Image (cartoon, rainbow, N blue to C red):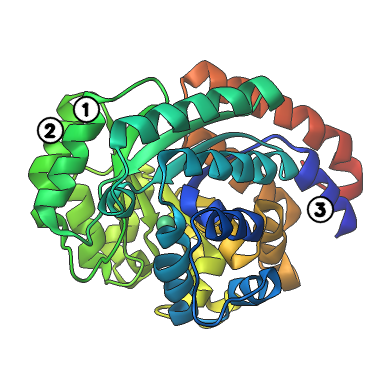
Amino acid sequence: MQKLRSLLLEVPKTEIHLHLEALASVDTIWTLMKKHKISYADISSKDDLRKRFEISSLNEFLDLFINVIQDCFRKEEDVDLLIKDAQNYLSRNNIVYAEIFFAPSKFLQNGLEFAELIKRLSAGSGNIERNTGIETRFIIDVSRSFGRDNARANLDLTLKHRNGTIVGIGLGGAEEAGPARDFAPIFEIAAAEGLHVVAHAGEVVGPESIWDALKLLKAERIGHGISAIQDDTLVEHLAERQIPLEICPTSNLLTQKYVKTLNEHPIRALYDRGVNVTVNTDDPTLFGIDLVDEYMRLTNRGFFKPDEIINLVKSNTYATFLPQERKDAIWAAAQKIVASYSAELEIA
Ligand SMILES: [Zn+2]
């Protein structure tokens, strides 16, 4: 297992489902609390904050995310700290390319300017690439949570201030409260403007939510999508079209909606039925996980064999919005590393 961990660390990887704010470190939030003189009832030291980061339920996660993390960003320049956190996470995991969600709604409600935020994020993306060679792109999460007018406003801002680091829009937030049909016209405009479109679906709502994301939003990838397993026709459809599912196993375990233990996670059944599944962290810092850990967990008690794990790494690379030749180059580099481990790990 130690060998497999070394291989997973060494192999160049991609990640397509993680949220920028969820990369915020304890240091970042503590720095912002001091800078803006923000106090919270039960956080009076960095240690208190660190304890608050040790979440064990969805409620604790939402409380930390909404009431502390998102609340701390009071100036546009604050996102520079997130870029630093992102660089640390990506380098530590040897992720060479990542598509990162950025959800502007809460930042804008805090009075921050979209244009300036995007300028800083794009500059940050450039800095990461100069410092480490790692490429990052952003997907603007227009959000289900604040209604269609808010989502439309987010799209308009995205189109107005778009640059090469923004590759698409996504739909995250409250899946139950914000059904896909409310956002269909927004997604149609985004696609017509040449943006990629993705959507979280089937995370806490049944397969009908995934069908809606595919049919009404024309989503190119599905975030989570784990409730697909309840609908054979949908599973066949996903397998036939090879529509990638951005699966985040640890996140699903914390949500506790469809899976209580890893062994009952549908990722195995979906994989066996030919669905294009990929592995991602969703909220790495907040969940205290690295992408490498996420892959390693899937090998627990032979749930996935080493060669299958490598297949998942490959699927993630090919599910990115990179040009074909870049995908091929990343995978070619990965194969060289895999080959050097093949004898020890019985990987073909
Ligand atoms: Zn997500």
Q: Amino acid at mark 2?
A: Ile
Q: Amino acid at mark 1?
A: Leu
In terms of image quarters, where does ligand 1 lie?
Answer: bottom left
**Numbered disc in front, either 1 or 3:** 1
Q: Residue at the far top: name it.
A: 325
Q: Which residue, given by chain and number where applicable, does mark 1 sit on?
A: 159
**Distance between mark 3 and mark 2 Cα atoms:** 43 Å
x and y, in percent, of residue 19 in the image: 46, 51
Which callout, 2 or 1, points at the residue further toward the start of the chain? 1
Q: Which residue, given by chain and number where applicable, does mark 3 sit on?
A: 5
**Numbered disc in front, either 2 or 1:** 1
- Residue drawn where x is 36% and y is 31% of the image: 116
Q: Which residue, given by chain and number where applicable, does mark 2 sit on?
A: 189
Q: Residue at the far front: name it.
A: 37
Q: Secondary structure at mark 1?
A: helix
Question: Do the residues bearing badges 2 and 1 touch, measured as CB atoms within 8 Å?
Answer: yes
Observer-nearest residue: 91 or 266? 91
- Residue drawn where x is 22% and y is 58% of the image: 144
> In the displayed structure, would residue 11 be above or below residue 297?
above
Left or right: where 195 falls relative to 279: left
- Crowding near the residue tagged with mark 1, few <14, some 14–19, many ≥20 C-alpha atoms within 10 Å: some
Which callout, 1 or 3, points at the residue further toward the start of the chain? 3
Q: Secondary structure at mark 2?
A: helix
- Crowding near the residue tagged with mark 3, few <14, some 14–19, many ≥20 C-alpha atoms within 10 Å: some
Observer-nearest residue: 303 or 95? 95
Question: Do the residues bearing badges 1 and 3 touch, measured as CB atoms within 8 Å?
Answer: no
Give residue 107's mark: none
Question: Do the residues bearing badges 3 and 2 touch, measured as CB atoms within 8 Å?
Answer: no
